Image: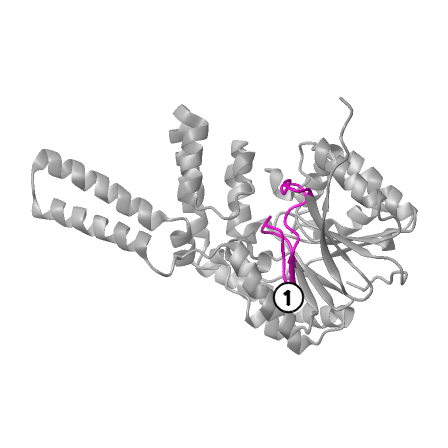
Amino acid sequence: MGTIKLPASTSTVVLSDIHLGVEPRPSVCRALSEVIAAHSGAELIFAGDSFEFSSTVDPEPYQAWRLLCEANGEVLDVLRTHVASGGTVTFIAGNHDAALPVVADLVSRTIAPQRPEAVQIVPWFVRRFDVHVEHGNLWDRDNAPLHPLADWSAATEPLGIALMRRFVTRLGAGEFAHAHDTTPVAGLARAYRLFGPRFAWVAVQYFSTAAALCFEAGRRRKRQALEAAVVGEQRLGDVALATGVSTGALGRVLQGVPAPTHLRVRDTFMRLYFDRVFASVGLTLSASAAAFLGAAPLTLGILGASSAYLAASVMRSNPRYVGPVTALRDASSLVADALDASCVVFGHTHVPEQSDRYVNLGSFAYCLQGGRPYATIEVDGQVTLRRHVEAPQPS
């Protein structure tokens, strides 16, 4: 993970959350081509979720990359032209393309067969002109890896991606793929509206997947986390050397990272709202029993307990779920202070925003109002959030 040297007059272009999957997306490809063509010779930093590896049911990364190449040949051609004209490309792994470092050599050869060194793939972050750039999923508990420098494995994928691959992709329900700030309950309500008579089957698939994820959390996951921590600690020195920040500073950042949801059974169980589901089932069954059997003490007790739990859970002042927009905004201050960064650039949330020391790139693919967002970093460290408005297409 080295620092790419750029000409003094060249801006760095940063894009995030393009989500190129196994289904072609002509409008996204066209807009991306226009942005790249307007910055010939620059370094392009793709700050995570560039490719939708989780859009394939088969988690094997080499097979997934072949399918992604088949669907996105136009984008790859544009990147080849960019590199051939002297530009460079850097990919930062996100939660949807966490497997990129596994296929790094293949990606480099695909995009830059004559200049593979012009393509860089990093698992966590890069630093340009005192600006810190990472995807940001590390700070979203539902989509965080066990360690940002550990090797990718399908067996340790975070909760959000595991649900994506095992439930959403298998179901063919892309509508759920990028609803970052929702809850499973809200998602199931949307599924009811979308699938109608098939909803019962969809609900069974969801809860069987969720139950498996709860089962996988706990002791085995803790062992995996310890193994990931050992690997990450071994690689921390190389990252410090490549980025020019100290291992101590990186350690302070890692100390502030929240524990991933899928690390603990209770966190997984609660995040999937199984407690409310069981309370709702208890409420329904006890109410039905009371209607047919009368006011039996046990029935009334279950009815009262279920009702009280649901009311307290919904009205709790400290909600169990802090959305990624807030989580990443708060994390940017910690990262900026610990790493002495003039600005922190994240993506992941699909909500673009900019303040004094923080820029969120939003999603180049999904933020359409006012244009597709991206950023430039000038040699003085100035970060500007921009919008690309596509040229009208001939009718």
Q: Is residue 177 left or right of residue 199?
A: right
- Residue 208 in view: no
In which quadrant of the rendered view does residue 169 lie? Answer: top right
- Give the percent coordinates (x, y) of residue 226: 54, 66
**Residue 185 point in image, percent of width and height:** 39, 43
Q: Quadrant of the C terminus?
A: top right
Q: Is residue 107 left or right of residue 52?
A: right
Where does label 1 land, which residue? Answer: 231
Residues shaded magenta: 346-371
Q: Is residue 128 left or right of residue 204?
A: right
Q: Residue furthest front?
A: 370
- Which amino acid type is marked by label 1? Val
**SS category of the residue bearing label 1:** helix
Residue shown at 56%/51% (left/top)? 157
Q: Is residue 226 above or below residue 361?
A: below
Is 88 located above or below residue 2 in the figure?
A: above
